[in-house]
Each structure stands twice: as structure tokens, then as C-alpha cells.
Image (cartoon, helix red, strand yellow):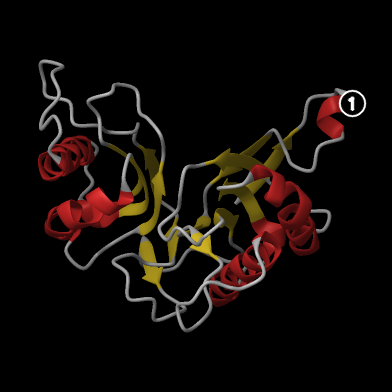
Amino acid sequence: MDRREILAERPVERGRGFMPGVSVNPSRVLFTAGLTGRNPDGSVAAGGMGSQTRRAYERLQAILSKAGASFDGVVKQLTYVTDLDAYNSAGRPERAKVFGTTRAASTGLVVRRLADPALLIEVELVVDLPGSPGKSLLEKYNVENHGGSFHQGVIVNGGHLLYLAGQVANNVDGSVAGVGDWRRQAEKVYENIGHILRAAGATPASVVKETTWVLSIDSWRPASVPVRRGFYGDDVPASTLIEIPGLARPEFLVEIEVIAAVA
């Protein structure tokens, strides 16, 4: 990958610990799922934000190592936290230990909750990989037996990346499908995603990263599982699930954004 860091010649930009922009010409790219501070047994790391941040980066290190990568190759980081003050005091120092002088393009968001109410932080990465592209366009893998319907890492070897706008339960006429109905909105959102993928010559198996924002994780999970399984089958992407307080219209319960790879 040909990487170029975009930095405006202003003191405020030079003083930050991240790059405002990173320009890349894809050759090999790794997308990770959002990783949290879970221990190998599934429990949440004790000790608060600092411990959970450290554990999240330990898990991400395992994903990078399997792909032959390191944190030096990170081009984009997205961090979700439930407590900004706790992150600033205890999480940022752990992040600094991992990245050192590497400055990735970074986004941090405060959210209402993560997949488990005990989780305080979730981090996902996009990483520049060394070496020549593999034979397959996509390599999807796990480094842990996590039991979820997602892969922890997806490597894209060459091809083109297709970024979809966040999809909601809009009908063709602009009305909202399934107002108040989680199952119907899940069906409509994935239907809309499928239309765009087909128009680009892609399929659900082409999806490398999925980010889902919902108003209620507890309501989304039981309604979405059969719909999502019918859409992806076993060829699931790297995924992140976040609970937020609102979307563009009050009728929307869910919004899903995906990135796909097309040969």
C-alpha cells in the first residue's frame, strides 16, 4: 500500500496525536472487528477503563500478528467509549504505550452502551499490510473462539473497496418500513444493502466490515439474528455493534454501514 499522511501546516495539527488524514492506494488491507476488554473466558477485564483498554489492544495485537502486521501499519482507528473522562485519564495512556510515535487517522465517539453493559471501550482498526496480495481477494479469520457471528479480521488482497452509506429502513418512496418493528426494519436495511452490492457487482460475501448502530441492543439481537444469518450465511464480515441515543429520523431503529471488496 502506498501510504501518505495528510497534515496541514498548522501548529494545532502538528500537536495532535493522530493524523487528520491518511491517503492510501490499496494493495493489502486488514479490517478488524471492534474489540473490547474481554478475557479469554469471556469475562470483562477487571480494573476499569485502563484495564479494559489494555486488554482490547492485546486482542488487537493478536489479530495483527496473525496477518503479519503491527501497530505501525495502522492507518485508521475508531474508538467507542461509554465514559470520556475515564478514557482520557486511564485509557489514553494505554493507547500511547501501544502506538508510540505512530499517528493513525483516528475517531473517538462516546456512545450510550456497548454489546455488554460492563464494557467501557471498543476499538477497531484498518491496517496497511506488508507483502504481495494473496491469491484470494478476501481472507477472513478469527484468532479466538469467540462464538459470535463475525470474523475478527478480514484481509483484502488488491481489488477495489466499496464504501456504502449507512442504510436505514427506507422504502423507495421515502417512507419508513416497519415503524416500531425491529424485525421488519432489519429485513429492509439488509434488502437495501443487497441492492447496492448487486449494482456494484458484489455480494454479501464481499462485505469485509459491518458497523451497526441501534437504539437498543437488547431489542436488536433477537430480531436481527435470523435476518442477518439469511443475508450472510456463514460468510460473515468483521463487525461492530453500538447502541446510540438516536438516528436521523425518530422512526429509524437501526442503521448499518458496510465496506465491501470487489475484484
Give me the residue at 15% from left, 33% from top: 180
Q: Is residue 47 above or below residue 113?
A: below
Where does the image place residue 103, in percent across and percent down from the top left? Answer: 75, 47
For label 1, the SS is: helix
Q: Quadrant of residue 238?
A: bottom left
Name the residue beneath numbered marker 1.
11
Q: Nearer the viewer, residue 6 or 44?
A: 44
Q: Quadrant of residue 234?
A: bottom left
Where does the image place residue 101, in percent across and percent down from the top left? Answer: 83, 54
Q: Nearer the viewer, residue 35 or 8?
A: 35
Farthest residue, direction bottom: 41
Farthest residue, direction right: 11
Where does the image place residue 11, in percent across and percent down from the top left? Answer: 89, 26
Instruction: Residue 75: tell me if it is visible.
Output: yes
Give me the residue at 45% from left, 58% from top: 117
Q: Amino acid at mark 1?
A: Pro
Q: How many numbered callouts?
A: 1
Give me the residue at 40% from left, 73% from top: 141
Q: Nearer the viewer, residue 194 or 45?
A: 45
Q: Is residue 132 left or right of residue 17?
A: left
Where does the image place residue 253, in percent across and percent down from the top left? Answer: 25, 35
Q: Residues within 10 Å of mark 1 (few under 14, many from 20)?
A: few
Q: Is residue 22 above or below residue 79?
A: above
Give me the residue at 28% from left, 66% from top: 149
Q: Is residue 10 left or right of residue 148?
A: right
Q: Quadrant of residue 42?
A: bottom left
